[in-house]
Image: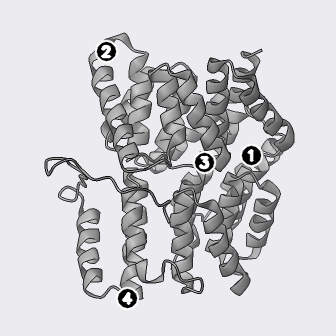
Amino acid sequence: MLSMCSLRWHAICVATTALMLCAGAAVSTPYLPANDDVVLERLPEKGDPALRELKRMRAQLAATPRNLEVAAVVARRAIDASRASGDPRFLGQAQAALAPWWSAPEAPSVVMLLRATIKQSQHDFDGALVDLDRLLKADPRAAQARLTRATVLTVVGRYADAQGDCIELSNLATALVVAGCLAPPTSLSGGAERAYAELLRVLVRPGTDAVTIEWALTLAAEIARRRGDAVAAERHFRAALALDPADAYLKGAYADFLLDAGRPRDVLPLVAADVTNDALLLRLVLAEQRLPDQRDAFAAHRAEMAARFDAARRRGDSLHRREEARFRLAVEGDAAGALVLARDNWKVQREPADLRILVDAAKAAGDAGALRLATDWIAKSRLEDATVTAALAGSR
């Protein structure tokens, strides 16, 4: 169940609500359990009404698998469940709901948009872009597809193309959605101050819904953090949490900020109730590791985290190299193993967190070539990131 709600996932899910327009995994050898006692999956349906409803709708879809309306609802609900729980197996449910159309190049537009959302979350960015390109060729005013494509382009480091899509949103979405779309690619390519100022300027406008404001505040917090303005970053993180204290992406981002600030104890109440979410469990492990009075809890959570990574490997899941690299490096002390994972991850996605673990692992392993990958990218993109800069400075 290893998934951190990354920039792309958070932006796509939140903006679906903001725009009000929301109308395959890599193949691997199946894991065969040794006996019937092996537990393959635990989904907390009994305690979650949304999951019970998803299960009910899946049963309805099983009776009429080509019912596009029901299939789309099931796929959306499963995507939402994956985001909320951090469990990518819900994405398998979403894909299964769309099975009659999954391989069809000319699928209905709602299927192509959902298919692209699933593919990008599975790190099939090329596949997602094929669907999004086709959607936007047919309908250049498809705002959700436009925003989703901008987000995917940002993740793979195509910042100018992403900015172009965001500009196209100007007449299709609110000013805050447009500013939020532009903020990541602009701030990651030499325009952090400009992107930050624009977000703050638009945030003060009245009449924007809370979901979009929380999204924009989170973006502002991340930009402020990269610019080295810890005071502003914390102010934005706290304001965003006041609007949505359950947002897993936001809590993970704030936890990373607190860990970098040397405040592991503040991480505990932030994430301790969310250990079913693997990304937040990882932050808890990293915090407990630094607190002597949490030794027993750390040992238990460390073992649980290791078991979940092992289970992911058994499933053939290689999508979460970033999180495992952090665990290998910081918790297990395996610099070489962490660097292998970080390098492989960098080939696929290029968000600031991907660069950070690449630098940290390369530094720990003493790998000059991997460090050059990072410095070359920073020079090419004109990235401003105080934490990465500090890590690189310590490697010299």
* Residue nearer the viewer, 380 or 104: 104
- Mark toward the start of the polypeptide (2 vs 4): 4
Q: CA distance from mark 1 to mark 2?
A: 40 Å
* Among numbered discs 2 and 3, the one appearing first in the sequence: 3
Single out the mark in the foreground, 2 or 4: 4
| Image disc number at residue 196 | 1
Cα separation, mark 2 vs mark 3, equals 35 Å
Residue type pointed to by label 1:
Tyr
144 vs 305, left or right, is right
Density class for disc 2 (Cα within 10 Å; few <14, some 14-19, many ≥20) is: few
Q: Residue at x 59, y 63 (%)?
A: 208
User: Which residue does the image show at 80% across and 42% down from the upper left?
Assistant: 193
Q: In the picture shown, does residue 230 fall above or below 29? A: above
Q: From the viewer's perspective, is 60 left or right of 256?
A: left
Label 3, secondary structure: give it: helix
The residues tagged by marks 3 and 1 sit, at their Cα atoms, a distance apart of 10 Å
What residue is at 75 percent from the left and 61 percent from the top? Answer: 162
Mark 2: amino acid: Arg
Q: Mark 4 or 3, which is nearer the eye? A: 4
Which residue has dot 3 on it?
217
- How far from the left and from the top, in percent, is residue 318? 48, 47
**Labels 2 and 3 touching (C-beta < 8 A):** no
Q: Which is nearer the N-term, disc 3 or disc 1? A: 1
Q: Are marks 1 and 2 in contact (CB under 8 Å)?
A: no
Tag 3 or tag 4, which sits nearer the N-term? 4
